[in-house]
Amino acid sequence: MVDSNRGDRGHWHLLLFFKILIAWESASGQVHYSVPEEAKHGTFVGHIAQDLGLELAELVPRLFRVASKGHGDLLEVNLQNGILFVNSRIDREELCGRSAECSIHLEVIVDRPLQVFHVEVEVKDINDNPPVFPETQKNLFIAESRMLDSRFPLEDASDADIEENALLTYRLSPNEFFSLDVPTNDEQVKPLGLVLRKSLDREQSPELHLVLTATDRGKPELTGTVQLLIKVLDVNDNAPAFDRTLYAVKLPENVPNGTLVIKLNASDLDEGSNADIIYSFSSGVSPDIKSKFYIDAISGEIIAIGHIDFEESKTYKLRVEAIDKGYLPLAGHCTVHVQVLDANDNAPELTVTSLSLPISENAQPGTVITLIKVFDRDSGANGEVTCSLTPHVPFKLVSTFKNYYSLVLDSALDRESVANYALVVTARDAGSPSLSATASVSVEVADVNDNAPAFAQPEYTVFVKENNPPGCHIFTVSARDADAQENALVSYSLVERRVGERALSSYVSVHAESGKVYALQPLDHEELELLQFQVSARDAGVPPLGSNVTLQVFVLDENDNAPALLPRPGAGGGAVSELVSRSVGAGHVVAKVRAVDADSGYNAWLSYELRPAAGGARSPFRVALYTGEISTTRTLDEADSPRQRLLVLVKDHGEPALTATATVLLSLVESGQAPKASSRVLAGAAGAETALLDVNVYLIIAICAVSSLLVLTLLLYTALRCSAPPAEGACAPGKPTLVCSSAVGSWSYSQQRRQRVCSGEGPPPAPPPPKTDLMAFSPSLPPCPGSLNATEDPQASLESSGKPGRRGGARSIILCRRRPNTAPSWAASPRIWGWSWRSWCHACSGWRPKATGIFWR
């Protein structure tokens, strides 16, 4: 069925084609119209129905229609009045381009019967298109070196219109460089062009803007323009030029590397490579400048690359050149003057020149010691330097000239107080921040012999045992000298004097360097108890100075003397013989053994004991331990032997103890014979007592005289001291010192003995401060035995050491020493005496010590 339908349609189309063909052939006439282009909508073209011979009433029934191949609805027919009018814009240039003839072909078709009419509508040209150039702007590149009358072709303008509307005339905007060359109709081969009438200068006019105008001949005239941009091509005819020929730059010293100094700007009036500039230092720039500065070849920046030091160079002169890249390069030059600004980067420098070192301690104030030079490499306030010295020293700085100082002595020196001064000189500049430098100056004070050797104390007391070996060291003196070197080199010597009849140097010596004192010979306490002498210490300075010290050498007793038996007064030596009556009772003293010991102290303290009889028989006698008195122990009888031989051992208390033996012969007689013997004994005792009484009287008178003289001397001395002007706040002698002690002991002297203690004979040297000493020893003496109960007497004992006695009993010692500031005239030569005061004891028929002592004046 589908196929049948398709066949029916094909037949219908074929029938329609034949009908049209028949109508075309029957209507062979053609109508012509004209209409201007760009006519408005509704513009009348023509009475197409009338001109085709059609009635208005049949237009619709016969299906009147207009067809235009390819032109659409440009023209339309009003079926009411049969008029052809413009339906839409008609553009001749769009329809026909530049063709001289332009028309629109219309086919008018009517049915019943089918008729086809051909209508030609000519489109008339109007001047509706201005001249048009190929481009709105034409760029021309012309070298500034082109010759005059050079021709530069241009493209013509075109006009879409025809005939008169398309005929063009040209004109060029006014300028002084180019003219327009327009060819005639016969010279169509020659294009439109510009002709150079004046030389170009790119630096003055790098570009020229011209306007080329084309005008047609239509009514109204229409014009078209093109912008002519003429770019003048550069020629390297200008050298680079800097803004200034001299640049002044201030640059602080010590700037870090990479610091921008200045950026130069050179310009070249040329362009392109001719204006490309390369910056560099001139060939005459020194290598030192190149080591400190760098110039960027492209940007022209000068950068610091080395150490910029004001003290090395205050200014730098940089010669810079700028060279373009033209075919023949041209160069410009300038000078950069770099002024380096000082920074306080240098501390002051001190130079010390010694003149007189070491300096003597007796130098006068104002003495120049050193010269000091100060230098600061900076400038201005950074280079202004002031100096100062360590405070509290006996020196000062004196400015002698700019940056020159003298170190001078300001006050007196004392090497013994300060031997060396470590001075610090400080130099400080006035920069900000301030910098300083110091220099150490060691000032050594040279010694002057202004100090004498000094001992630790004015006198020394030395105790030496007697019988010392020859050459033994007994003491060492030492003196210190506050000076130095040879001024402090101390040598020792004895102050020579005589001791008795012998020289002091025969007893002792002193080592010159060590000060050791030696005893040259054995000392004997019994001969010399005290040896007083002086040792001199003298330095090696010039002139030498010296001082003395006093040594009191006490010779200590040793038990080197055995007890010595004393004969009975009026009797010869040998054994003691006595007659004893047989009628005596127990405790009767029949005899006494007398002995003495040359030693002293315990060594002279004697004791007695009776040796046992031969065969062990008991003796009717005994001996007192300390008195040596022999007494009966019982009543004698007939059985006792008429002749008694007693051996009495006398022993001291030394270590070791020394002894002596006394023989006592007693004859026992009857009572009738005893009185004779007793009367003889009593007569001898009476004579002895009378002699003793005379001696005691003389002794008492002597003691009183000496005591009176001493008291008178002391009173006179005190009066002189008080009347004298006070010295150092003292107007009276110092208070005496009293030392008392007590001990146990006894003295057993059987003869009067005077001990002599001597410190020298003859004129003495300069003594230490004078003194008046009094030493008195008062032993506690028991009363004489007046009854038979007193069988044993305690006796006094005195030791040189002052220690308590080894045995029972009591001892009292009084030591008085007086040291005035000045000595009386009679104390110029010290003397020491030993004295002893004894009394006769009737009961014991012997000498009893009552007082002993030492008087030192």
Image: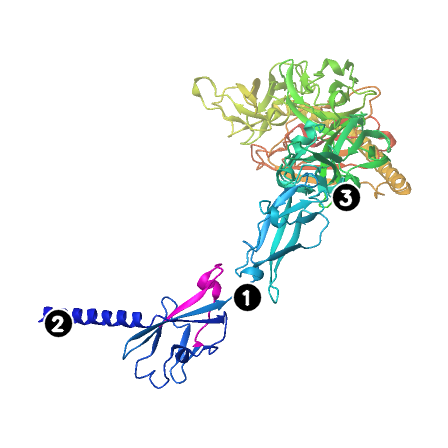
Q: Front-most of 476 and 857?
A: 476
Q: Name the spot of residue 78 as percent of width and height, x first.
A: 40, 81
- Magenta residue span: 85-107
The quadrant of the rendering that contains the C terminus is: top right
Q: Does the rendering let one see residue 417?
A: no
Task: Give the mark toward the camera: 3 or 1.
Answer: 1
> What amino acid is labelled 1 in the image?
Asp
Secondary element under disc 3, as helix, strand or loop, is: loop
Of the numbered discs 2 and 3, the one sitting upstream in the chain is 2
The residue drawn where x is 10% and y is 70% is 4
Residue positioned most to the bottom: 57
**262 shown above or below 61:** above
**845 shown above or below 342:** above
* Image disc number at residue 5: 2
Secondary element under disc 2, as helix, strand or loop, is: helix
Q: Which residue is mark 1?
A: 128
Whole-angstrom CA distance, mark 2 to mark 1, is 55 Å
Whole-angstrom CA distance, mark 3 to mark 1, is 93 Å
Left or right of residue 204, residue 193 in this image: left
Secondary element under disc 1, as helix, strand or loop, is: loop
Q: Which residue is mark 3?
A: 430
Of the numbered discs 3 and 1, the one sitting upstream in the chain is 1
Q: Name the spot of residue 353 as percent of width and height, x first.
A: 79, 27
> What amino acid is labelled 2 in the image?
Asn
Residue 387 shown in magenta: no
Residue 96 shown in magenta: yes
Residue positioned most to the left: 1
The quadrant of the rendering that contains the N terminus is: bottom left
- Number of residues whose C-alpha sits closer than 10 Å to that of mark 3, classed few (under 14), some (14–19) or many (20 or more): some
